[in-house]
């Protein structure tokens, strides 16, 4: 069964993006994988392992707050993943070992997804070969 992969960044658009991803997953009768990628840049005041653990804990807590706020009740099975790295690289790695029907992300993420490679969003689309649903920042779910 193919999943819906939802990339997020915990910006203001995140709630909207999650709602859209849940709608798509419900329509396709599949599960949702929510992916948050972050950079691991060691702060001078904290051990790298502690910093990583704090990033993972904060991401999990932020996601659980979204689940509560949106009253996500599990009608659509979902999982949350936080991974170290650039978002485009983490998506590509996920696609190599998992079956995905569509990728859902915010407009801002789409614009910035390949910045670190100096490539455009079109390059990302060409490399993934999977439909990408870009949710406008001002989207209001029905």
Image (cartoon, helix red, strand yellow):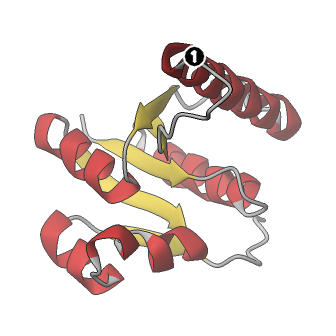
Q: Position of residue 43 (x, y in %)?
A: 61, 35
Q: Position of residue 57 (x, y in %)?
A: 66, 19
Question: Does 54 sit above or below residue 17?
Answer: above
Q: Position of residue 2 (x, y in %)?
A: 26, 41
* Residue at 64% in and 50% down: 18
The image quadrant that residue 46 belongs to is top right
Question: Does 118 sit above or below residue 78?
Answer: below
Q: Which residue is mark 1?
A: 53
* Residue at 24% in and 40% down: 94
The image quadrant that residue 17 belongs to is bottom right
Question: Does 119 sit above or below residue 103?
Answer: below
Can I make out residue 129 in this image? no
Q: Position of residue 90 (x, y in %)?
A: 31, 45
Q: Is 136 displayed left or right of 118 in the figure?
A: right
* Residue at 32% in and 58% down: 88
The image quadrant that residue 118 belongs to is bottom left
Callout 1: SS? helix
In the image, 24 versus 62, the foreground residue is: 62
Q: Quadrant of the C terminus?
A: bottom right
* Residue at 24% in and 34% down: 1
């Amino acid at each position: 069964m193919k999943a819906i992969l939802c990339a997020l960044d915990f910006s203001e658009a995140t709630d909207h993006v999650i709602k859209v991803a849940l709608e798509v997953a419900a329509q396709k009768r599949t599960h949702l994988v929510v992916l948050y990628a972050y950079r691991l840049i060691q702060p001078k005041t904290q051990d790298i392992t502690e910093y990583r653990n704090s990033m993972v804990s904060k991401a999990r807590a932020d996601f659980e707050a979204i689940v509560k706020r949106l009253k996500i009740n599990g009608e659509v099975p979902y999982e949350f993943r936080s991974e170290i790295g650039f978002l485009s690289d983490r998506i590509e790695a996920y696609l190599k070992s998992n079956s995905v029907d569509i990728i859902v992300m915010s407009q801002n993420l789409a614009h910035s997804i390949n910045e670190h490679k100096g490539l455009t969003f079109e390059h990302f689309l060409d490399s993934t070969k999977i439909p990408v649903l870009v949710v406008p920042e001002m989207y209001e779910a029905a």
